[in-house]
Image (tube, rainbow, N blue to C red):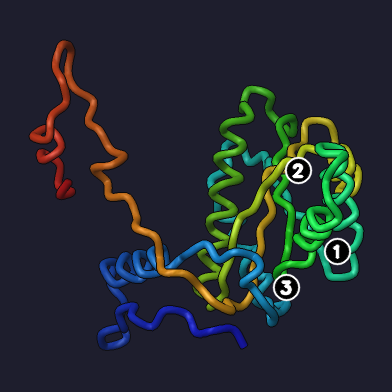
């Protein structure tokens, strides 16, 4: 069994859950999500029912034009050696002088975490007027939904990337079509160990207020909103 999900979410009152209760539960879930390095994710991973819940969460992402511009490719244990070969070959292509130790480290990354999947975004599927950036935003929302569901189920997760994602060998292995891009890998598993949570930015770090002509936004402008900046 995976570790229990956060337990400090509000409970129902008289069997009824209010909007505030749901908002508080959502806040607890989002705040409890933490990136866990794949090497710290161990078995057991999600079972079939849990995996279905994680994948179904992706389907709730916004998707302009209902293009379904993303897909996920699961990498079962039996296929990990093939992925390891691709990681090793990609390293040699970049650095012909890579040491045997570096090669082993590159190959070993394919074996981390019990659940591993590749995230693929399609820049050409459907309406050509919906550009790649919007498709990537939709993909990111789908991935975040999966991470949150994995967290709710008690699992840890991580996103990983790297130069191997652009290699010809990886494109061939995963059968990427023209216009498809390997965005990142998603790793999910039971948390073996975790570091202290990193400080989160606060809204004042990333929110500004659009001012009128010839005016500069000030702290007073932001204070006019109901949210306490």
Residue 1 left/right relative to 9: right
Residue 180 left/right relative to 141: right
Q: Position of residue 51 (x, y in %)?
A: 68, 71
Residue 228 left/right relative to 141: left
Q: CA distance from mark 1 to mark 3?
A: 11 Å
**Disc ID at residue 80:** 1
Q: Position of residue 59 (x, y in %)?
A: 61, 55
Label 2: element kind: helix
Instruction: Decide: few, some or many residues near mark 2? Use Cα within 10 Å; few <14, some 14-19, many ≥20.
Output: many
Q: Position of residue 14 (x, y in %)?
A: 26, 88
Q: Residue at x 61, y 78 (%)?
A: 190
Q: Residue at x 73, y 37 (%)?
A: 122
Q: Position of residue 150 (x, y in %)?
A: 57, 69
Q: CA distance from mark 1 to mark 2?
A: 15 Å
Q: CA distance from mark 2 to mark 3?
A: 20 Å
Q: Quadrant of the N terminus?
A: bottom right
Quadrant in the picture for residue 42: bottom right
Q: Which residue is mark 2?
A: 165
Residue toward you, 56 or 173: 173
Vertical relation: 10 (above or below) 174: below
**Disc ID at residue 114:** 3
Label 1: element kind: helix
Vertical relation: 215 (above or below) 139: above
**Is the residue under label 2 in contact with that under label 1 (CB below 8 Å)?**
no
Label 3: element kind: loop
Residue toward you, 34 or 141: 34
């Amino acid at each position: 069994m995976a570790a229990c999900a956060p337990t400090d979410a509000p409970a129902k009152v008289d069997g009824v859950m209010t909007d505030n209760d749901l908002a508080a539960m959502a806040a607890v879930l989002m705040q409890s999500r933490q990136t866990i390095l794949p090497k710290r994710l161990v078995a057991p991973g999600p079972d079939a029912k849990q995996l279905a819940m994680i994948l179904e969460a992706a389907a709730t992402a916004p998707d302009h034009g209902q293009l379904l511009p993303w897909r996920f490719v699961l990498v079962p244990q039996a296929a990990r050696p093939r992925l390891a070969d691709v990681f090793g070959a990609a390293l040699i292509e970049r650095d012909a002088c890579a040491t045997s130790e570096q090669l082993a480290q590159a190959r070993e990354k394919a074996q981390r975490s019990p659940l591993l999947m590749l995230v693929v975004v399609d820049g050409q599927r459907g309406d050509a007027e919906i550009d790649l950036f919007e498709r990537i935003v939709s993909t990111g929302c789908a991935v975040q939904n999966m991470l949150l569901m994995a967290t709710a189920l008690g699992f840890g997760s991580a996103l990983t990337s790297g130069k191997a994602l652009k290699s010809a060998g990886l494109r061939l292995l995963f059968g990427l079509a023209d216009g498809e891009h390997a965005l990142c890998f998603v790793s999910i598993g039971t948390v073996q160990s975790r570091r202290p949570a990193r400080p989160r930015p606060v809204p004042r770090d990333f929110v500004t207020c659009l001012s009128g002509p010839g005016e500069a936004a000030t702290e007073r402008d932001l204070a006019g909103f109901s949210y306490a900046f």
